[in-house]
Amino acid sequence: MSRINPFTPSFGSVPPLMAGREQLIESILNGLDNAPGDPNRTTIFIGARGTGKTALLSKIADEAESRGWVSANVTAVSGMLEDVIQRSVESAKEFAEKQNVNRITSLSAFGFSFTRKVTDEPKGNWRTQMNRILDELNAQGIGLLITVDEVGADTDEMRVLAAAFQHFVRERRNTALIMAGLPQQVSALLSDKKISFLRKAFQHYLDPIPLYEVRDAMRRTVELSGRKIGKQALDAATNATGGFPFLIQLTGYHVWRQHAERAEISPGDVTAGVEYARADMEKMIFRRTLDELSDGDRAFLDAMSVDEKESRLSDIKDRLGVSSNYANQYRIRLIEQGIIGSRGRGKLGFEIPMLRDYLRSGGE
Ligand SMILES: Nc1ncnc2c1ncn2[C@@H]1O[C@H](COP(=O)(O)OP(=O)(O)OP(=O)(O)O)[C@@H](O)[C@H]1O
Ligand SMILES: [Mg+2]
């Protein structure tokens, strides 16, 4: 009998088990449980492509909803503000309907009054409309979580949202704003003087996940779906992921499907599956990530890929024939983008697994 493959190698999908994010999720949820003004209620997740930003926002929104919050989940594109309103209304109605099924009549009456007040009254500007929504929700003890994915600097709407949210906080309204973005986009956003409020947000970098957490999540994902994996196979699969969230799903997915009808995943399945995972990583992560870099960034990475393990900044400078100052600027940029990381005194390494091999092979 073959079972359904439990791994989720597609962007934005929440995996059955999220490796290594427990504490982060806990601290945000504690912030929601706590009074308005808790600093966790304004948070930004920062990470390179495929580090799990969207999945994390979805997971937090799900958890918040199961604690009686309403959530409006949007992406920072034009039309975002209107979308926040529509999603809030939609999500509040769903919430009221669920309560109705559970026969909590005061809340089903709330659903009715909410629709009437929020949708039927004259509009006003964005903050006014949001105040009305928050008044209605908060009067019933319901908080509103706003999640904004793919934040960046190039939107006026982000400024409006940030300014209004600052007032919501001051007025101690029961709300939270959780955002996510690529490192270079977030730093552009935070350097915008008009939204200095966001600089006070908690910033969480989505660093690689410790391998013991990866191992545990992979094993449990396999077992929850009714199969087994032995130590040797599990170790090999874990190591192949390098702690990179997207690669955890790609590896698990391809390893699983080698012999989905068998009760146990073998080391051979892992060897074969890892090859497919590598090929998908190239298509789905490396090309997208490298396309977003400048020629100078790319030259720096190519110069690093020559080394077997860590690279020394002084070697890279020599290979590129540039000044220390110039090399150092690219080092800082690439670290900020989550593509490379510092490995102690003047040394650097890749943060995205398999990227070195890809660059060596020509990377096109
Ligand atoms: N903590 C985790 N443990 C295991 N897998 C995860 C984890 N977080 C995310 N994933 C998986 O990683 C993949 C990428 O996740 P996601 O789409 O959230 O990344 P992202 O950072 O939003 O990427 P992008 O910047 O391209 O939008 C998905 O397949 C998701 O299921
Ligand atoms: Mg995303």
Image (tube, grey):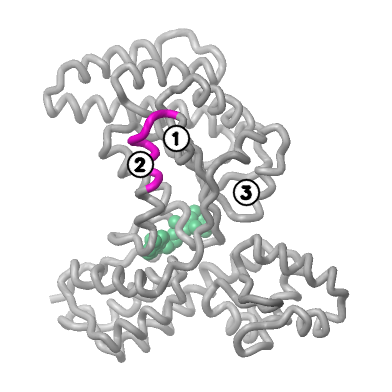
Describe the element under mark 3 as helix, strand or loop.
Answer: helix
At horizontal 35% and vertical 56% (from top left) the residue drawn is 22
Q: Which residue is mark 1?
A: 38
Stretch in magenta: 27-36
Q: Nearer the viewer, residue 21 or 107?
A: 21
At horizontal 35% and vertical 41% (from top left) the residue drawn is 30
Label 2: few (<14), some or many (≥20) within 10 Å? some
Describe the element under mark 1 as helix, strand or loop.
Answer: loop
- List x then y, in percent, for residue 64: 33, 39
Q: Can I make out residue 345 in this image? A: yes
Give the farthest residue toward the top. 122
Label 3: few (<14), some or many (≥20) within 10 Å? many
- List x then y, in percent, for residue 227: 17, 76
Q: Amino acid at mark 1?
A: Asp
Q: Which residue is mark 2?
A: 30
The verdict on label 1 being within 8 Å of ligand 1 is no
Q: Nearer the viewer, residue 100 or 141?
A: 141
Q: Nearer the viewer, residue 123 or 146?
A: 146
- List x then y, in percent, for residue 222: 23, 72
Q: Quadrant of residue 67?
A: top left
Q: Circles 2 and 1: CB distance less than 8 Å?
A: yes
Q: Is residue 9 left or right of residue 333?
A: left
At horizontal 57% and vertical 71% (from top left) the residue drawn is 286
Q: Is residue 38 left or right of residue 189?
A: left
Q: Earlier in the sequence, mark 3 or mark 2?
A: 2
Q: Can I make out residue 10 in this image? A: no
Chief secondary structure of the magenta portion? helix
Q: Quadrant of ligand 1?
A: bottom left
Q: Amino acid at mark 3?
A: Val
Q: Circles 3 and 1: CB distance less than 8 Å?
A: no
Q: Amino acid at mark 2?
A: Asn
Q: Which residue is mark 3?
A: 186
